[in-house]
């Protein structure tokens, strides 16, 4: 069944996205501490709202049955990332540690991938019949392109000798996990297509792709020294949410 979609929520989302871009543009003229504090609080607010919305989904649909693990996985994933954003903000706003990477916050960022993976894999196992040969070919090409692009960026990053091993290892881990998570989300979006909830999974997949791009840009920026808290590249993270 093909479902007609109300475009009003997407117009509203577009307005918010533009407003956030304007905010980042204006905030660049503030002093560094004000820029850092305001953007850290923005990340906490955005991830907190995502956690609340994910919790409402679990509350409405439950975490049992065929899709229980999917709902629970999405909630736990975004909640752990909310905790990570809060810890990052504490490092910067309370202890005044600029760009705390790698740090304890990364333990929660990385832990968030686990429930995401479990939920999406559970979904694909249940709907594996929806992955036709044509979709498998398209997905395989997408995976090849994504991993190749990420690999090229990582090779350049790993050649920077002045960076410590832990930072390099973290960059590699994030790139690999992001790529596979994006592939799983795209696979789910392919299965749904234009059916009910299909558009929701399409936006989730697009969000994952934005996160892949943001993490690669963050890794490169921290290694070569041009990244700072409040950098406009952070818009990719916020838009991905």
Image: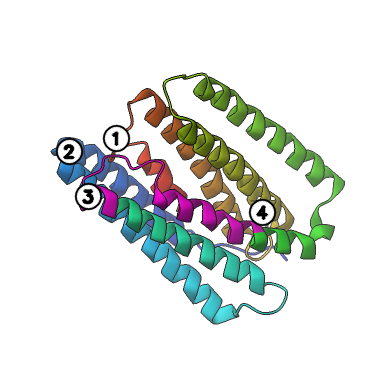
Above-or-below relation of 51 to 41:
below
Q: Quadrant of residue 27?
A: top left
According to the image, label 2 marks what residue? 32
Above-or-below relation of 114 to 60:
above
Mark nearer the viewer, 1 or 4: 1
Extreme residue toward the front, this view = 165
Residue 134, how many percent across, how many down?
83, 43
Which region shows up in magenta? 90-117
Q: Mark 1 and mark 2: span between their CA atoms?
A: 9 Å
As helix, strand or loop, the secondary structure at mark 4 comes to helix
The residue positioned 53% from the left and 56% from the top of the image is 111
According to the image, label 4 marks what residue? 189
Q: Mark 3 and mark 2: span between their CA atoms?
A: 15 Å
According to the image, label 1 marks what residue? 228
Mainly helix, strand or loop, the magenta region?
A: helix
As helix, strand or loop, the secondary structure at mark 1 comes to loop
The residue positioned 50% from the left and 44% from the top of the image is 211
Q: Quadrant of residue 217?
A: top left
Q: Mark 1 and mark 4: span between their CA atoms?
A: 34 Å
Q: Mark 3 and mark 1: span between their CA atoms?
A: 16 Å
Asked whether 113 falls inside the magenta stretch, the response is: yes
Q: Earlier in the sequence, mark 3 or mark 2?
A: 2
């Amino acid at each position: 069944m093909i479902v007609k979609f109300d475009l009003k929520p997407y117009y509203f989302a577009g307005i918010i996205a533009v407003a956030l871009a304007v905010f980042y543009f204006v905030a660049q003229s503030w002093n560094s501490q004000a820029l850092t504090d305001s953007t850290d609080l923005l990340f906490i607010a955005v991830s907190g709202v995502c956690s609340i919305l994910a919790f409402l989904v679990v509350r409405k649909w439950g975490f049992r049955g065929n899709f229980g693990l999917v709902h629970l996985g999405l909630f736990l994933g975004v909640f752990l990332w909310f905790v990570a954003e809060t810890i990052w903000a504490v490092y910067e706003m309370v202890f005044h540690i600029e760009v705390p990477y790698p740090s304890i916050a990364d333990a929660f960022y990385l832990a968030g991938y686990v429930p995401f993976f479990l939920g999406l894999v559970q979904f694909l196992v249940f709907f594996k019949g929806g992955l036709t040969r044509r979709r498998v070919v398209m997905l395989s090409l997408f995976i090849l392109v994504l991993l190749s692009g990420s690999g090229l960026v990582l090779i350049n990053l790993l050649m920077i000798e002045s960076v410590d091993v832990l930072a390099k290892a973290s960059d590699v881990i994030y790139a690999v996990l992001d790529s596979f998570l994006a592939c799983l989300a795209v696979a789910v979006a392919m299965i749904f297509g234009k059916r009910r909830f299909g558009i929701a999974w399409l936006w989730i997949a697009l969000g994952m792709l934005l996160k892949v791009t943001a993490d690669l840009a963050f890794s490169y920026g921290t290694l070569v020294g041009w990244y700072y808290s409040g950098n406009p590249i952070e818009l990719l993270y916020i838009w991905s949410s």
